[in-house]
Image (cartoon, rainbow, N blue to C red):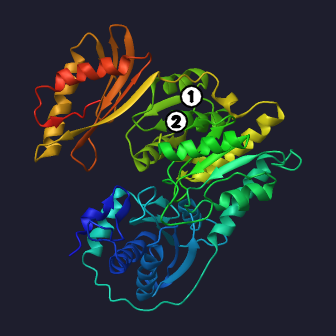
Amino acid sequence: MIDFKKLQNGSDIRGIAIQTEGGPEPNLTKETAGQITGAYIYWLSKKVQKNPVMLKVCVGQDSRISGDMLKEGVLEAISLWGAEGYDAGLSTTPAMFMATVMPQFEFDGSIMITASHLPYERNGFKFFTAEGGTDKEDIAEILRLASRYNFIGGVYEEMKTNVRMMYAAYLRQMIAAGLKDVPGYLKGMHIVVDAGNGAAGFFAKEVLERMGADVSGSLYLEPDGTFPNHPANPENTEAMAAICKAVKDNDADLGIIFDTDGDRSAAVAPGGIPIARNEIVALAAALAAEDYPGGTVVTDSVTSNELHEFLEGKLGLKHLRYKRGYKNVINKAKELNAAGEQAFLAIETSGHAAYSDNYYLDDGAFLAVQIVINAARLKAQGKDIMALLEGLGSPAESKEIRLKIKAEDFKKYGAGVLEDFGKWAEYSNRLEVVEPNYEGVRVNYDIDGYKGWFLLRMSLHDPVMPLNIESETPGGVGMALAAIRDFMKDYKEIEIPED
C-alpha cells in the first residue's frame, strides 16, 4: 500500500516511477498518478469555484521515460471527473504555468510531470493555477485526499495542445521588445545552449536561432529521459564543466544551461567562465536593478557575504537572506511586496529565479532571455556579460558538509544541537551570530585573522545537518571546521565526515 505522505517534497510531489536493479519498489505508478490527479481535480474545483465538469486542465511532461505512463493515469483521472484534459506533450514547468494565464489558453489548472534534476527512475508532479504553484500545505491536502480516492482507470478523449509553441513565441516577443532598436536582433551573437537532454532544448532552435543567433556547438538538445550525458542540473559540476568547455571551444559570446524541466538556468561568459550560484543571483539582480532602485532581493540562506556587499553596496538594493527552498523564497518576496516593499526578485543559488514582473514564476527561460538581451547590447559596446558583475567578490574557499544525525528522534536531537551551537557562537570572542537569520545558525568568524562565515541548519526531511563554510582567505575553511569539530566532540550522535 502506498504511503502518500512520503510522496511529498515540499511544494512538489516526487517518487520512484521506474524499478531499478536493487532499488526500492516504485511508489509512483499509473494508478497512483490517477489517485493524485483525482484529488487535484477535487482540490482545483474548490480553489477556482467551478464544478469539475467545467474545468479545463493542461498536462505536460519532461523527457523522462516514465512520463507517458504517468500521463495516461493523469488524463484518465481528469476524464473520470468529467473535466477536459489536454495533452501538451513535451513541455517545461514555466510553460505549464503560462498555460493558465496566456489568453490563448487560460486553463483552470495545469499539471507538470517532472522530478526536476533527480535521476531518471524518479518522477513527480507540479501543479499550477493562475495564482501560481501549489504550496506545501496544498500538496499535503491533495495527498490526503488521494489516499482516500479509488482510481479505477478508464478512457479519455484525445485532446492535444501545443503550449510550448506559444511559450516559445512569447519568449521571442520578449527578445524583440528588448532589442527593438537593434537590427537583426541576435544576429552576430553566438550562444551555446546545454539542455542536458531535458525539456528545454527548444530554447536554442525555436527561440535563439529564430531571432538570429548562431547556436552551433549547443549540447544535448534532444530529449532523452535516461539523461545519458550528464545530469540536467546547473548545480552539477559535470554539467557546468560541459557547458563551460563548449563556450570556450566554440569561442561563443554566451552559454546557457537549463535543468530538466526548464525552471532553472545558469550562464557562462566568454572564455568558459561559469555564472552560477552566487554569481547567477548577482547577475539576475543586476539585470533589473535600474528598473527597481532600492528594491529588495530575497535569496536563500547560503548566499555569500560578498554577494550581500555587491547587492547592497554596488547595486544599492536591499538583500534579505531567507530560508532554503524556492517556494519559501518566492512566498517571502510575495509577502513583502503585498506589504508595500518592492521585492522584485526571489532567487535561490540553485538557479530558481522569480521576478515580480513575471508572476513570481521561477522560469529559467525568462532569466535566460534577460541575460541574452543584455549580452547582445553589451557586445555592441565591445563588452560581455561579465561587465554586469564588476565589483562582485568571491570567497577564496567554499565547502558544504553534511553532518549525519544518528539519534532515533533526529529532529529533536538536531534542534538541541542548534540551540547549543548558537549559544557557543554567541559567547565566543572569535565568532559573531548573524541577525536577522531565518534558518539554522549563521556565524561570521575571525579566527587568527582568517575571516568568513558558516551556517549550520537542519535538513527538512533527512537526519542530516548541512554545514556551509566560506572563507575570505585560503585556509580559513579549515580553521572554522576545526573549531566546529571541537564544539561537536561532545555530541556523540553527530557524525562529521572526514575531509
CA separation in Å, label 1 and label 2: 7 Å
Quarter of the figure with the C terminus: top left
Decide if residue 135 is in sight here.
yes
Secondary structure category for the residue under label 2: strand
Residue 90 placement (x, y as % from top left): 57, 70
Determine whether label 1 and label 2 are within 8 Å by CB.
yes
Quarter of the figure with the N terminus: bottom left
Q: Height in image: 62 above or below 482? A: below
Secondary structure category for the residue under label 1: loop
Residue 140 placement (x, y as % from top left): 30, 63
Q: Which residue is mark 1?
A: 317
User: Residue lying furthest right in this view?
Assistant: 183
Does residue 79 appear to the left or right of 164 in the view shown? left
Q: Which residue is mark 2?
A: 297
Q: Earlier in the sequence, mark 1 or mark 2?
A: 2
Front-lying residue, 249 or 199: 249
